């Protein structure tokens, strides 16, 4: 029987460190690896619960080690994951300052959506972020995971519901934290941009103490990051981005218009400019919205981790982990607006102000009321387009607290049976405080004050602005408690080898709530939607996996898992099978194939939430096309009311994954090639308002107009949207060359070539080609690493490539004759990062580098109708950035 001695652990971790920093992008993903008695101990690889002696298997895995993170110059976990070539659909980043989740981020493998990628920490599930992306989509937040605590990140690039259950439709991300540390390490890292903004300081400390039978590891990290404001990047931080068709200032400065938007009264050019507005070519006093926006929020974060392992005897080990993270994130966007929320009807000598939403009206003398703005106005309806600049920018302050506790035991029941059982509880709490928006009631009180009311063309006093400014709030909490128990080992011998197995059971309970303040939830705040949801569910699962050596060098692995959900959804029970084949015709060549069925239970946000009011900027595509594609009918509609939120009628998504590949190692050359297909049926999605309008024939029941045909609302609630299929090729090639006296040279090229990405909106509609159609993904993403190590010095060059892709509204531009004047494709993009390190002594290491050496900016989308007019899932405006770090061991 193999024992877990201190020497074995030391050897095990030495081997792991050696392999994890090697060239191959398919470094084995092991929880444990050791050489004992001249035999290689079996290791557990993400994507399988059977421990094996082989470093590669049928499941394609990419491993990013701590050394890879340092060489890439990455500032956060999201930077690491967002750089993956398999991230075909683009990441959700903290650039989404206008959304429901500006303090969070997530990754989107294979274009399946962030919620369809399972994120684990040390192989265990973590709670979903309590606020849904877009108000509905549940996901795991990666913005607050401490980078310094990470040993490596293992990315399984195929579906694995047979192993892990729900959510693993497009892949699995397993973040492995450091443990069993026996020295103290302090690290300070400073980064800043050449053009200003986003300065970042990180301090981390790790220490550990050991005895013959126990190890205690402690880690702490503090990060202080400045905001990147639109004013820091004036070429992008403006509403006027040259070359974009929809680039324009907001007409909501200070104007009075009729029901058709025709100008009745405005400020003089001098007064418009003096009050911080912008005089537009059409004579209206407008506003440069982006002057008050953040590209990326300000954030402060501190994290702690305590990890304990204790050998009870030679066969049993107790382990536990306690984590806590607190983060504060602050962001700003442009001042709120008031528009058609209050209509003014002129009839004869009267003007009547109407708040239709709340059923309020009041009559005034049109010649004297509201500063005389309506004197001489013809009968009809009017409204102000007013930017509430006196209230300042709208602000959001997020306080995030993550807590988790894990207690488990593992070891050997017999010489051939290992066990691992654990219980964990994890909770994420997010509170946000908002300011800068008026309520309907406070605005009504201001407009109707006194005998003649107040004109919105006049300056609002500081006292009145304070009364108008509503201080709102939102609080959410997500909790997951889970129990896992499993055994693995050898079953019996066949002529070709030993049959290995793993079986186990899991239980999980998750509950959450997401509550906005009552004013916001009830639609009482102008231009702002709120959400309210809460619910809980339990999940039971049993799994089994068996690896059968059919003939020499050919192994077939069968896996299956049954999940049962006790909630209000239609999921009930779901069985997920998987078949994998490994064939090694020669020692250094692996041929592999995999078929897996996947599923995803509906998001709790989408099941237990309430329909929520929100707002969106859109083009009324059907009306625009009916008008010939140009003119007023094609202008942007600001703050269109939309409905978002839950749908309790949702069903589970189901899918299939296929993978066929090879791994070839020859001396210092490593090559991998995998062809993959991801299919999802009964797809749940929340199509955007613009998407619905662009495909009005398929979504006619979600578009609402008044009697005159004017667009008044779009329903974007989640629905089962039929199907999606993506396919492509992952490739990597690496080589190491050892010189006689000048160190080692390394090269590694890895990438993804997207072959197909189609989505079918309804069972009867034609498939949409998302590679050649609107708003596509880049067909090729790739990374080239070039390294040189010489004695105590090491340097690395990372070249990142993103292929060209189609613009957001390519088809509309072609159909409306605009493609000759405006580019309907987005240019390809290259960034180059350089990193270097030097070991001054055995205890002191200096490192530094420059990210985006050539200051490559984002690639403009000339068809995108919303600021900042580039795909934020792939690009940013950070620009050239430098960093310096010192690490001391003692």
Image: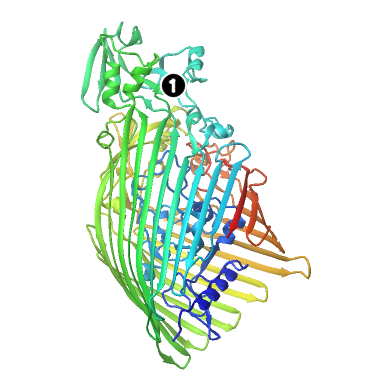
Q: Residue at x 67, y 46 (%)?
A: 853
Q: Is residue 722 visible?
A: yes
Image quarter hosting the C terminus = bottom right
Residue 573 appears at what percent x and percent y?
26, 67
Q: Is residue 687 visible?
A: no
Q: Residues within 10 Å of mark 1 (few under 14, many from 20)?
A: many
Q: Residue at x 59, y 61 (%)?
A: 67
- Rendering quarter of residue 490: bottom left
- Rendering quarter of residue 542: bottom left
Residue 253 appears at what percent x and percent y?
44, 21
Which residue position holds label 1? 253
Task: State left or right for residue 6 relative to residue 794.
Answer: left
Q: Secondary structure at mark 1?
A: loop
Q: Nearer the viewer, residue 111 or 182?
A: 182
Residue 818 appears at what percent x and percent y?
54, 36
Q: Residue at x 52, y 51 (%)?
A: 76
Q: Nearer the viewer, residue 399 or 445?
A: 399
């Amino acid at each position: 029987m193999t024992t877990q001695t201190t020497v074995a652990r030391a050897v095990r971790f030495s081997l792991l460190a050696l392999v994890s920093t090697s060239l191959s992008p398919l470094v084995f993903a092991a929880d444990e690896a050791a050489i004992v008695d001249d035999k290689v101990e079996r290791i557990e690889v993400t994507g399988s619960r059977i421990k094996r002696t082989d470093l590669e298997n049928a499941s394609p895995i990419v491993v990013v080690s701590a050394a890879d993170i340092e060489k890439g110059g990455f500032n956060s976990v999201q930077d690491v994951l967002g750089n993956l070539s398999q991230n075909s659909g683009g990441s959700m980043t903290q650039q989404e300052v206008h959304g429901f989740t500006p303090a969070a981020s997530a990754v989107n493998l294979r274009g399946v959506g962030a919620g369809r990628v399972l994120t684990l920490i040390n192989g265990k599930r973590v709670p979903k972020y309590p606020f849904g992306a877009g108000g509905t989509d549940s996901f795991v937040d990666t913005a607050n995971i401490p980078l310094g605590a990470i040993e490596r990140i293992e990315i399984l690039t195929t579906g694995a519901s047979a192993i892990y259950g729900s959510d693993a439709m497009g892949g699995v991300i397993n973040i492995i934290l450091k443990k069993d540390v026996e020295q103290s390490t302090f690290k300070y890292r400073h980064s800043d941009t050449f053009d200003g903004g986003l300065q970042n300081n990180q301090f981390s400390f790790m220490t550990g103490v050991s005895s013959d039978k126990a190890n205690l590891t402690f880690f702490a990290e503090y990060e202080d990051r400045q905001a990147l404001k639109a004013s820091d990047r004036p070429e992008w931080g403006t509403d006027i981005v040259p070359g974009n068709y929809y680039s324009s200032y907001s007409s909501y400065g200070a104007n009075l218009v009729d029901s058709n938007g025709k100008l009745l009264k405005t400020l003089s050019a001098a007064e418009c400019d003096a009050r911080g507005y912008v005089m537009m070519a059409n004579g209206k006093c407008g506003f440069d919205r982006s002057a008050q926006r953040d590209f990326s929020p300000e954030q402060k974060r501190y994290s702690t981790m305590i990890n304990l392992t204790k050998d009870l005897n030679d066969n049993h080990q107790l382990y536990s982990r306690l984590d806590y993270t607190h983060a504060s994130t602050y962001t700003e966007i442009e001042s709120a607006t008031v528009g058609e929320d209050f209509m003014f009807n002129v009839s004869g000598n009267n003007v009547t102000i109407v708040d239709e939403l709340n059923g309020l009206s009041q009559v005034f003398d049109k010649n004297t009321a509201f500063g005389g703005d309506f004197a001489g106005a013809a009968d009809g309806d009017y409204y102000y387009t007013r930017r509430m600049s006196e209230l300042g920018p709208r602000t959001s302050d997020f306080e995030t607290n993550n807590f988790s506790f894990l207690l488990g035991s593992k070891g050997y029941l017999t010489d051939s049976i290992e066990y691992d059982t654990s219980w964990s509880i994890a909770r994420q709490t997010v509170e946000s405080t908002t300011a800068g928006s008026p309520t309907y009631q406070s605005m009504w009180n201001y407009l109707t004050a006194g005998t003649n009311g107040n004109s919105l063309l006049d300056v609002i006093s500081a006292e009145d602005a304070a009364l108008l400014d509503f201080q709102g709030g939102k609080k959410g909490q997500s909790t997951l408690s889970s129990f896992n128990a499993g055994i693995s080992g050898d079953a019996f011998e066949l002529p070709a080898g030993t049959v290995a197995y793993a079986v186990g059971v899991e239980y999980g309970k998750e509950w959450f709530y997401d509550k906005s303040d009552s004013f916001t939830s009830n639609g009482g705040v102008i231009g702002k939607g709120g959400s309210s949801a809460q619910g809980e569910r339990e999940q039971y699962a049993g799994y089994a996996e068996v690896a059968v050596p059919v003939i020499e060098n050919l192994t077939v692995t069968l896996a299956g898992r049954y999940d049962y959900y006790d909630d209000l959804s239609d999921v009930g029970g779901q069985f997920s099978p998987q078949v994998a084949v490994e064939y090694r015709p020669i020692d250094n060549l692996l041929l592999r194939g995999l078929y897996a069925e996947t599923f995803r239970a509906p998001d709790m946000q989408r099941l237990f939430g309430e329909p929520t009011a929100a707002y969106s900027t859109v083009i009324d595509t059907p009306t625009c096309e009916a008008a010939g594609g140009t003119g007023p009918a094609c202008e942007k509609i600001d703050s269109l009311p939309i409905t978002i939120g839950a749908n309790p009628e949702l069903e589970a998504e189901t899918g299939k994954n296929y993978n066929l590949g090879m791994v070839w190692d020859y001396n210092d050359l490593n090559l991998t090639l995998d062809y993959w297909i991801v299919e999802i049926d009964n797809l749940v999605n929340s199509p955007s308002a613009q998407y619905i309008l662009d495909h009005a024939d398929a979504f006619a029941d979600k578009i609402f107009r008044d009697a005159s045909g004017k667009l008044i609302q779009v329903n974007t609630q989640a629905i089962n949207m039929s199907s999606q299929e993506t396919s492509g090729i992952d490739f990597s090639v690496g080589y190491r060359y050892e010189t006689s006296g000048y160190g080692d040279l390394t090269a590694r090229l890895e990438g993804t070539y997207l072959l197909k990405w189609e989505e079918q909106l309804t069972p009867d509609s034609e498939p949409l080609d998302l590679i050649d159609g609107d708003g596509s993904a880049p067909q090729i993403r790739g990374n080239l690493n070039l390294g040189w190590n010489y004695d105590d010095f090491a340097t690395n060059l990372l070249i990142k490539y993103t292929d060209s892709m189609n613009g957001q509204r390519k088809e509309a531009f072609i159909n409306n004759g605009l493609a000759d004047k405006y580019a309907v494709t987005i240019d390809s993009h290259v960034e180059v990062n350089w990193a270097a390190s030097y070991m001054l002594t055995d205890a002191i290491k200096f490192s530094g580098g420059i990210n985006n050496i050539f200051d490559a900016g984002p690639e403009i989308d000339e068809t995108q109708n919303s600021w900042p007019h580039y795909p934020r899932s792939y690009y940013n405006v950070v620009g050239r950035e430098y960093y310096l770090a010192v690490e001391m061991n003692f």
